[in-house]
Image (cartoon, rainbow, N blue to C red):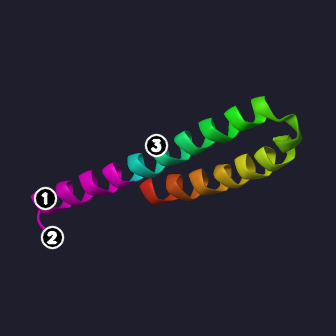
């Protein structure tokens, strides 16, 4: 793989990663809005956020 191909592959990897992060942030925003409406959902939100943290750690691993 030449330098141009490596650069393009890196660019695509970063673009895909940013898309996943954007999706996770949008979902988090939605969950937090629901928690504002119904505090009984806080436990579910905490579980989701911990799961999201694990997913972000995996993404971090793919970028390093």
- Residue under numbered circle 2: 1
Q: Is residue 15 magenta?
A: yes
Label 2–label 1 contact, CB within 8 A: no
| Closer to the eye: label 3 or 2 | 3
Q: Is 5 displayed left or right of 46 in the figure? A: left
Residue where numbered disc 1 is placed: 3
Frontmost of labels 3 and 1 is: 3
> Is disc 2 placed on a helix, strand or loop?
loop
In the picture shown, does residue 21 fall above or below 37?
Answer: below
Q: Secondary structure at mark 3?
A: helix
- Point out which mark residue 22 bears: 3
The relative height of residue 37 versus residue 14 in the rendered view (above or below) is above
Q: Nearer the viewer, residue 44 or 11?
A: 44
Q: Could you say which quadrant of the image residue 8 lies in? A: bottom left
Quarter of image, res 25: top right
At a point 66% along the width and 55% down the height, the residue shown is 54
In the rendered view of the protein, which quadrant contains the N terminus?
bottom left
Q: Position of residue 40 (x, y in %)?
A: 89, 41
**Magenta residue span:** 1-16
- What's the distance in space between the residues labelled 2 and 1, CA to CA? 7 Å
Quadrant (top left/top right/bottom left/bottom right) for the C terminus? bottom left
Tell me where residue 44 appears, x and y as whole percent: 81, 50
Name the N-terminal-most of marks 3 and 1: 1
């Amino acid at each position: 793989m030449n330098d141009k191909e490596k650069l393009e592959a890196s660019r695509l990897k970063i673009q895909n990663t940013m898309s996943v992060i954007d999706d996770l942030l949008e979902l988090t925003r939605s969950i937090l809005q629901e928690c504002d409406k119904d505090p009984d959902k806080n436990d579910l939100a905490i579980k989701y956020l911990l799961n999201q943290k694990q997913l972000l750690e995996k993404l971090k691993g793919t970028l390093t």
